[in-house]
Structures are given as C-alpha cells and as structure tokens.
Amino acid sequence: MIFSVDVEEWSQSILDNKSTKSDRVLDNTLRLLDLLDEHKHKATFFTLGNIAEHYPELIKKISENGHEIASHGFNHSSIFNLTPKQVKEEVGSSVKLLEDITGKKVIGFRAPNFSIREYLFEWYCEALAVNGLKYDSSLFPMKVIKYGIEKEYSLKIFNEYKIQEHYLSYTKIGNRKIPFFGGDFFRLVPYSITKQLSKQLNQKTGVFYFRPYELDSKELASMKKTNTDIPLKWRLTQFIGRNNVEEKLIKLMKDYDFNSFENTHYSGKSSIVKSNKLEVVVDNIITDKAIVQ
Ligand SMILES: [Zn+2]
C-alpha cells in the first residue's frame, strides 16, 4: 500500500491558507515520522512550500530517513482559485524549494484540497509537466462535500503530458463511491470497518492519506485559548477521533506494508511512462473501469 501524508497545519487546510504557522506542525509531523520509522514503513510526504520554508530541517530529516518528498503547492491555494500562471508559480516555487532542501528530484504533486476539476486539466498538467513532475495524486473519482469530480471524465490530457494519475482509494457501496482510506473517514469510523473495506484494495498500490494534525488531540483547546474563531461545523467534525487515531494508525501499520509512490512506481526503468497509450493506474478496485472513458 502507499502511505501518503499532506504536510500542513489544520488551520491552513480548513480555515485560512495564509494563517500563521505554529510549531504544532513540526511536532505532529515528527510524531508521524517516528511511527512510520518504528514500523519500518516508507511514505510520500506531500509538503507545502510555506512549511518547508519554516522547517527545512524537518523536510531534510524526512528525506534522509528514506521517505519521498513531493509537493503540495506553496500556500495551500485551491487550484480552481488560481490563474494558469499562478498554478505554474505555485508548483514551480514549491518544487524548487523542496529540491534545494533535499538535493533530490521531486516527481509528485497533490493539489491542495484535492481541488482539481476537469476544466483545469490542461493548465494543471502543463504546470506539472514543465516543472518535471511525473505523477499526480489528487483525484477522487466521486463528488463528496469538499472535493471530488462527479461526472465521468477522461485522463487523455494527463496522458498527453505524461503525468500519471494515482487516485485516492475508495470503495463502492451500491452505486456510491466512498473515499474511506484516510482523512476524516479513517478518524471517525472504527478501525474494523477500515480494515474490512481495505481488503478489496490492490494491496500494493492502494493509496492511504493522512494529515499530521490528525494526531493532535490538544489543538482545539489551544485554539480556544487564543480565541481563534472556529465555526461549529468544524468543531463537530474536525477534532473528533483525534484521541484514538494514533492507536488506529498503529493497527494499520501492523496490518499492511506501506511504501512511497516513488519506491512503488518510479524506481528503475519501469518508473517512466513510456507510451502515448492511455495509461491509468487503478489503485482502487481493480475491476472498476467505469470512470475512465
Ligand atoms: Zn492539504
């Protein structure tokens, strides 16, 4: 399985992408790194430029511990809120910074808030390709509250730019697709359900995702102290389950072997997307071809 991490602050992700960074992101990411290393897993860390700028030593340490550093943009700006020129700058500036810090080539990208829509494919793929990236992991092939694409779409443009797409994993219940493998779902439901559903995934290429702040059970209390205004809907959904998420993560880490995108798909010759033929990685349910036209 692939273990993917979005290195960001909760407040940047949900409240305001320009919000002040605290040391919480540092502590939470180091805790996650320890858990991965203790259980001998490798992961891909999609890292924000503005986090790397504040904590270059953290990024260096993640890379030196054998994990992959990929880009999550510079400022956690949703792609649909940017012009094509700004998309190129967000991708380019974050990739350059991460490469300068680690000395290693960055090959992957995840859009902030999974903010890809079909009408953005051309700009988006061009921005990734001109910055030398090989893959993207931003698409949820279903519509959920904040992200995802409802209708069927073609990945022809991704293929033209030689950008390989790795979907976030999902399951199908009836006709509904549920993005269960990571994020809020993982935090909110009992681990037994995640375990049961994950058995149907491709055991090598299924994609789990996690944000370090989900380990932080003290964040809400700390924000109350500083009088940060947090809307009720976020209080009700974003902080529940943080107390026992570490316990669930440890169970998950014992049940599966995790690796990075780079180690799984891009080491050696097989890593290069060679042909112009439409090539799609189905990370999820192997038999599900309906979404690709
Ligand atoms: Zn994010």
Image: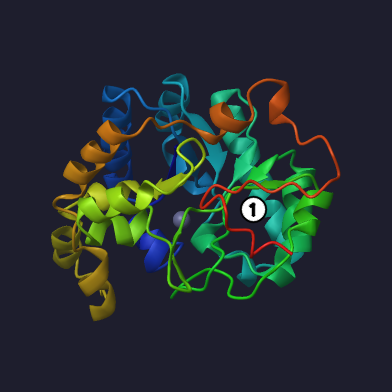
Name the residue: 42% across, 46% down.
208
Residue 195 visible: yes
- Disc 1 designates what residue? 90
Q: In the structure shown, which secondary structural element does the residue marked by tag 1 occupy?
A: helix
Q: Residues within 10 Å of mark 1 (few under 14, many from 20)?
A: many
Q: Position of residue 133 (x, y in %)?
A: 70, 40
Q: Amino acid at mark 1?
A: Glu
Q: Nearer the viewer, residue 62 or 75?
A: 62
- Coloring applied to the structure: rainbow
| Looking at the image, residue 236 lies above or below residue 137 | below
Q: Position of residue 286 (x, y in %)?
A: 56, 49
Quadrant housing the N terminus: top left
Q: Image quadrant of residue 292?
A: bottom right
Q: Position of residue 233 (x, y in %)?
A: 27, 78
Instruction: Decide if residue 194 is on the left or right side of residue 128.
Output: left
Q: Position of residue 18 (x, y in %)?
A: 45, 62
Instruction: Decide if residue 224 is on the left or right side of residue 141.
Output: left
